[in-house]
Amino acid sequence: GQNIDQPTEMTATEGAIVQINCTYQTSGFNGLFWYQQHAGEAPTFLSYNVLDGLEEKGRFSSFLSRSKGYSYLLLKELQMKDSASYLCAVMDSNYQLIWGAGTKLIIKP
Amino acid sequence: NAGVTQTPKFRILKIGQSMTLQCTQDMNHNYMYWYRQDPGMGLKLIYYSVGAGITDKGEVPNGYNVSRSTTEDFPLRLELAAPSQTSVYFCASSYGERNEQYFGPGTRLTVT
């Protein structure tokens, strides 16, 4: 079966750095996406990785290792507005997204 | 440019009733999707469309139907609503299959 695993909840301090991990087992791989979802709102796109390595975009970076079935999202200089759920999704061989349950990130002052 | 719009925002249905969730996008995207999101679970794909006149089943299509008569509109029909269909429904669109998906604000549906 297809499976995406990510921690259910994480807590971090304002101004700090946090890493949210995602491991996956899917039938085929056509890229990995990270989305941010604030409570009661729609998911919004953060990043896309299809090749191994690190993609940096401002305070957010995303890393992919295809051989290990592993990705992480790195958030630097955390702000209170970063309190949200972070969803990992893998595009399988049929170009359909398989979604993880999301990691709820709580930022404390 | 409104992006992806969905109506209604909230709805309560009685068991056995039917309804249509509306979705419209103004970005001229070929690909459109319907997902449901249940607490503690990942988004599940219900149906998707790669262009006007073409639709296909996703992971959880039972109890739902869709149509795509225009590029802009992708309504989702619930027939004979059941409590198991209580969920938040999101419509999304993308330019291509590998591109980021843009989501509508969602419809919160309760079936009692």
Image: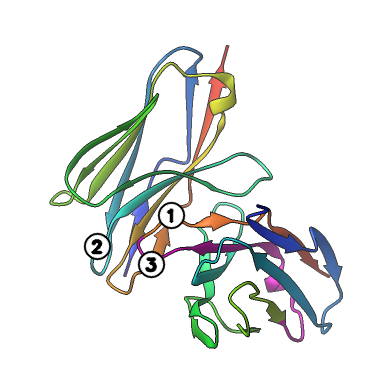
SS type, badge 1: loop
Q: Residue at x 84, y 82 (%)?
A: B17
SS type, badge 3: loop
Q: Which residue is mark 1?
A: B100
The stretch drawn in magenta includes residue B96:
yes
Specify the subunit that label 3 lies on: B
Q: Check disc 2: other Cα within 10 Å, few if <14, some if 14-19, many if 20+.
A: some
Res. A32 mark? none
Measured as percent of width and height from the top left, residue B78 is found at 72, 81
Magenta span: B78-98
Q: Which residue is mark 2?
A: A29
Q: Are the residues at dot 1 and dot 2 in contact (C-beta closer than 8 Å)?
A: no
Q: Which residue is mark 3?
A: B97
Going by the image, does B24 lie left or right of A2? Answer: right
Measured as percent of width and height from the top left, residue A100 is found at 43, 53
Check disc 1 and give the amino acid type.
Glu
SS type, badge 2: loop
